[in-house]
Amino acid sequence: MELNQKDILDSREKLAKRLAEVEARLSALQSLSQERDILKQTIWGFDELLKKYEGLPLTGYPEHPPLPDSHLWEGARYVLRQAGAALSVGEIYERLRVLGWKINAKIPSESLRTILLRKPDLFERIEGAKFRLKQRA
């Protein structure tokens, strides 16, 4: 079987069209994946609230996570509030990532660590290289 230029161009065009279809479907799946991650994080937050307040009547509404285009320290503050305990930078970063945050840095965890250290009024570093919300007097 001999291929000519027209056959090759036709085949290439069909493949390019199929690629565009696959990429469009993948984009939709990525959005669903991000939504799934946010839902998982929110459910985890509710589970943590239920554990924390087990046996007590709950009133009001839990804090909503800040949007990923907010300041990164706001996201870290939310994550630490939800955890109710000190977390490592890696743990904070992973939970932020699940919430849809992206840290555009060569070493995201180091950027996050720097941001936390620059907000000593909100975060304090404790033993074991963990951070917690600063205790208010």
Image (spheres, helix red, strand yellow):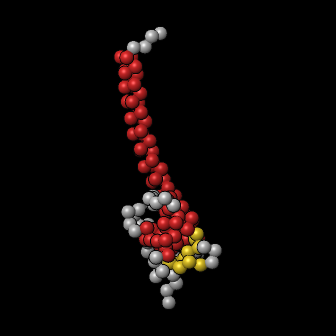
Up the image or down, 21 lies above or below 28; here it is above
Task: Name which residue lies at 48% across and 50% down.
Answer: 33
Is residue 70 shown to the viewer in this render? yes
Pick the front one: 16 or 62: 16
Residue farthest along the front direction in this orientation:
106
Q: Residue 94 at x, y = what percent?
A: 54, 61
Say if 20 sits above or below 82 in the image: above
Percent x, y for residue 47?
56, 66
Question: Residue 70 falls in which quadrant of the image?
Answer: bottom left
Q: Is residue 78 visible?
A: no
Q: Residue furthest right?
A: 128
At 48% from the left and 80% from the top, the residue drawn is 120
Say how many tags the image has. 0
Residue 11: x and y, percent? 40, 22
**Toward the viewer: 8 or 29?**
8
Q: Looking at this view, is 56 or 29 the one in front?
A: 29
Coordinates of residue 136 in the picture (x, y in percent): 49, 86
Residue at 37%, 25% (x, y): give it.
Answer: 13
Residue at the extreme bottom: 137
Q: What residue occupies the far top of the structure in this picture?
A: 1
Task: Identify the residue shown where x is 46% and y is 76%.
Answer: 118
User: In the image, is 87 to the left or to the right of 103?
Assistant: right
Residue 6 picture quarter: top left
